[in-house]
Amino acid sequence: MTWFALILVLGTDAAYLLLIRAQNTQDVPIQSIVPFIAAYLVVIAALLGTSLMRRLNPALRMPLRTAAAGALLVLGVLSLFSIGLPLFVAGATTAGATVRTLRGPLVTSSSLWSVAAAMIAVVVLIAGFEVTERMIVCPAHGSSGGGGTGFVTGPYYYDCVDGRLSFHPGSCTSTSIDPQGNVSHPGC
């Protein structure tokens, strides 16, 4: 079951990178979310791969699989309309493999570590989204804008004018740029 999840995670990561590369995003400000998700999936695959080592104590395998299962299930739900379905399936399969790892006294000794590992994996995912959502590189010339909503910090919008980035709290539905290149937000 863990091998299946590992292969599914790596395949989904590769397909995700190929799909992003195929999209034309030259006139969009560059965000760091894509590299974060790709790297996060590689780390999850490494957790799964490490948990497959036979010499590793089962008490250590369980937290590794639980962390991977928690991360994959949450990421699968959050990205359900793009790459989420295979990640959710991989998470469910990993959860099944974790349950099969449970035996005897291992249940009491590893359960707390497993819950903590899953929580840490999800906290790292959410924190990564919060940080990378705001890592925007503006084009050197021209102007653009956009916005988003953080899981914890709430909505924001930004402006890019000739390589200069400005953040603003809240949400905005209208942006205008005058002939001098000044950005204004009427009604925000």
Image (cartoon, rainbow, N blue to C red):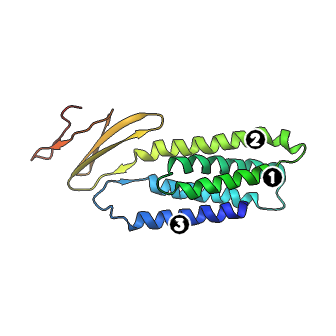
What residue is disc 2 on? 113
Q: Amino acid at mark 1?
A: Arg
Q: Is residue 166 visible?
A: no
Question: What is the CA distance from the residue labelled 3 to the residue labelled 2?
Answer: 30 Å
Q: Amino acid at mark 2?
A: Trp
What residue is disc 3 on? 14
- Badge 2 element: helix
Q: Which mark is residue 59?
A: none
Query: Of label 1 and label 2, which has the lower sequence position?
Result: 1
The N terminus, quarter of image: bottom right
- Badge 1 element: helix
Q: Nearer the viewer, residue 133 or 81?
A: 81
Q: Position of residue 170 (x, y in %)?
A: 33, 32
Query: Of label 1 and label 3, which has the lower sequence position?
Result: 3
Left or right: 169, with 140 as reference point:
right
Q: Indicate the quadrant where residue 19 lies.
A: bottom left
Q: Position of residue 38 (x, y in %)?
A: 52, 58
What residue is disc 1 on? 100
Question: What is the CA distance from the residue labelled 1 to the residue labelled 2?
Answer: 17 Å
Q: Of discs 3 and 2, which sits in the foreground?
A: 3
